[in-house]
Every structure is written in structure tokens, then in C-alpha cells.
Image (cartoon, rainbow, N blue to C red):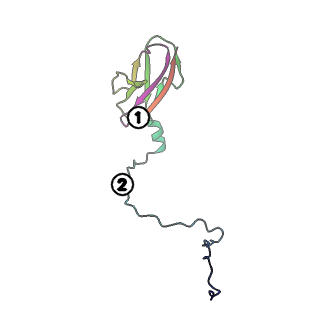
Amino acid sequence: MGRPARWHAHPRPHRPRRRPAGAGPQLRPAARRAAAPLNVRPAAQPFAEAADRLRLLFPMQGAVLAEGGPVTIRATGGRRPLTFLVDGAPLSAERARREAAWTPPGPGFYRITVLDADGVSARSELRVR
């Protein structure tokens, strides 16, 4: 005896249902996670922030200086005390001042960096001939 007509040798392959055009992707509910506390700094006024931003006044980026004699590195903005670095080595300077003296050891390229009390940095690269 044979099987009834409604039986198939292989089941029909599954076909996903179609969504109407423009329905967008189907979204699944998001898994619930414990919210981590956020460390948010209070928003500063845009004009005040730009004026207080740490930056190097001298030497400017790409400056070319003549060899011989000390160079005064000057910074503005940021929160004191400031730390001045040349190629990663700290310069001895009064921490309350916004400038430091440096004598280049010879011709070459140097990277000047200044760090403020908040860890914000500004840097400049220069060449001594």
C-alpha cells in the first residue's frame, strides 16, 4: 500500500517570511545589563575652554632655530604646575611658571612637550641648525 497523497518524501524547505517593503531590519530586544557609572566632566563654555586650552607659544611647530645659546620655551593655558619635556626628558624649571630655559645639545630635530596638572599635553617639533 502506498502513502496518502498529502505525505511527501522530503519535507518542504523552510522559507523565511517576507517583511513588507520599507519595514527595515527586524530588531531583537536588547539584553539587560547593569549600567556602569559614567565619569562625566561638567560641560564647559566653548569660549572659556578655547582660551584655557594648553598650548605652546614658543617654539612653534616646525620652527628652525640657530645653534648656540639657550631657548626659552613658553606655554599658555592649562592648569599649573606645568612640566616641560624635551624628547621625553624633563627640564628643570620652576613648576609655577609657564616657561623653561633649554640649551640644545647640538644640531638636530627635537620634540618639545608640555604637560599640565590635569595630564593635558601640547607639543611641538623643531629643528636646530
Residue type at tag 1: Gly
The residue range painted magenta reads 103-119
Residue 27 picture location, percent across and down: 53, 66
Residue 78 tag number: 1
Residue at 66 percent across and 69 percent down: it is 21
Residue 125 tag number: none
Residue type at tag 2: Pro
Up-down relation of residue 60 to residue 35 (above or below)? above
Residue 72 picture location, percent across and down: 43, 19
- Residue under circle 2? 37
Up-down relation of residue 62 to residue 10 (above or below)? above
Residue at 45 percent across and 40 percent down: it is 49
Residue 16 horizontal side relative to residue 106, left or right:
right
Magenta stretch: residue 66 in it?
no
User: How far apart are labels 1 and 2 at the CA level?
Assistant: 27 Å
- Element type where label 1 sits in the image: loop
